[in-house]
Amino acid sequence: MDEPLTGTRVLDLSRLLPGPYCTLLLADLGADVIKIEEPGKGDYMRELIPGVYEAVNRNKRSVTLNLKNKEGSEILYKMAKNADVLVESFRPNVTTKIGIDYPKIKKINNSIIYCSISGYGQDGPYKDRPGHDINYLGIAGALSIPGEINKKPGRPGLPIGDLSSGLFAAFSILAAIMLRGKTGRGQYIDVAMTDGLISWTSVRAGDFLLGRTAPTQENEMGHLSPSNAVFQTKDKKRMTIGAVENDFWVKLCQALNLNEFLESEDYRTNIKRVKKGKEIYRRLQRLFLKKTRDEWIRILDEAGVPCGPVYSFHETFEDPHVKQRKLFTQIQYRREKFLRQVRFPVKFSDYEPRIYYPPPEMGEHTEGILLEEGFSKEEIEDLRERGVFGVRNGNK
């Protein structure tokens, strides 16, 4: 059975996390993703955080090409003729300087979809600024949004800007592929990490966008419901409660024998409870310190209250529900070891995404892909000798 993106070739010039996460999603759905890396340097994530590199680069093949070398650029042009998508994550204007910008590639292949992922986008006063996830979170206002009652806003533990931009890029590429099926034309896609974060923060800025006062931790934010929070338990573990709707609030109070909350009009709606948030939270926290996490989860599960544990990675990977969902698999990696991977996280009724390549070593597939492009072995060896794509590395 063909996979959804079988026959779709993607040239991936990106590094680190946003672009590679985008192309991981495409590769898991069957796209032929060719990772194009600078000889001797490659994707910086290989050395920076190897675990991240391994997590987002499966199902791809790697080619090394010196794009500052004219012959290296000519090879990329030849590959672009047969490609459907090109993804890059250089700063704006870098691709123009090295001759691989969209206007140049479009002349070679008018139907190509060219996606640029950058921190601030291709225009605007910040476009040339260097940056990382934390900088984009700050500009977008995400670091001003509190996540817990009585605590100052903190930095998310996940690289939200990186992952969201990769997701927006993959989604937009698929939309462009569908549009190309109608028009026959490719197009340019400008994905800015900051833009995506601002889109996400809009769900916390509703009042502000309607012209009202911007919410703060002092004047309360609607999502900081005291019964939609994290609590510590007797065994110094933590648990989550998600009793936002009135039905769940009633079940929570009944399970905890908090009849005074049910009898008072001051706690009747979620909006009223938010206003009394600190008081309610303190009361709930005192109660939850009287039993262990697992004891409370049993009690609240039986009462039909949304609740759950705050897991470590070890607990997540061993959880019976997570195991039942078959989110993890093990693949052979670099011959001497196996690599555990998180699968594509969506289930289809008539298709199952596969893992068919481990994360590639730098330049591992250079020779094989150049042979596919029509180069002879003698030409490849000559190009290697002239430093177009570096020394022999891994299996070709």
Image (cartoon, grey):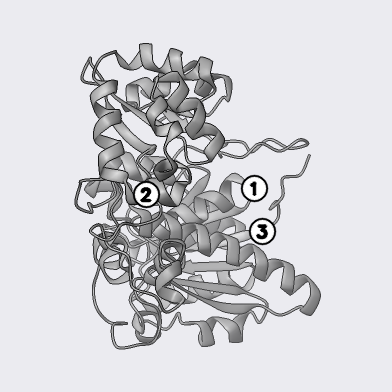
Question: Crowding near pointer 1: few (<14 within 10 Å), some, many (20+)?
Answer: many
Provide residue 120's location: percent of width, then percent of height: 35, 76
Q: Quadrant of the N terminus?
A: top right
Is 317 drawn above or below residue 148 in the view shown? above
Checking the image for residue 8, the label placed there is 3
Q: Residue at x 51, y 26 (%)?
A: 251
Considering depth in this image, is 33 or 376 the residue closer to the camera? 33
Considering depth in this image, is 307 or 369 the residue closer to the camera? 307
Label 2, label 1: how many angstroms apart (C-alpha)? 46 Å
Is 278 drawn above or below residue 8 in the view shown? above
Q: How many marks?
A: 3
Q: Secondary structure at mark 1?
A: loop
Label 2, label 3: how many angstroms apart (C-alpha)? 50 Å
Give the left or right position of residue 61, taking residue 31 as reference.
left
Regarding residue 92, the answer to whether it shows in the image is yes
Please, what is the three-letter code of the amino acid marked with disc 1? Answer: Gly
Q: Do the residues bearing badges 1 and 3 touch, measured as CB atoms within 8 Å?
A: yes
Of labels 1 and 3, earlier in sequence is: 3
Question: Crowding near pointer 2: few (<14 within 10 Å), some, many (20+)?
Answer: many
Q: Quadrant of residue 265?
A: top left
Q: Which residue is mark 2?
A: 274
Provide residue 393's location: percent of width, then percent of height: 36, 46
Please, what is the three-letter code of the amino acid marked with disc 3? Answer: Thr
Which mark lies nearer to you, 2 or 3? Answer: 2
Please, what is the three-letter code of the amino acid marked with disc 2? Answer: Val
Q: Do the residues bearing badges 2 and 3 touch, measured as CB atoms within 8 Å?
A: no
Regarding residue 335, the answer to whether it shows in the image is no
Q: Residue at x 46, y 59 (%)?
A: 166
Considering depth in this image, is 182 or 79 the residue closer to the camera? 182
Q: Residue at x 33, y 58 (%)?
A: 390
Provide residue 37's location: percent of width, then percent of height: 38, 60
Checking the image for residue 30, the label placed there is 1
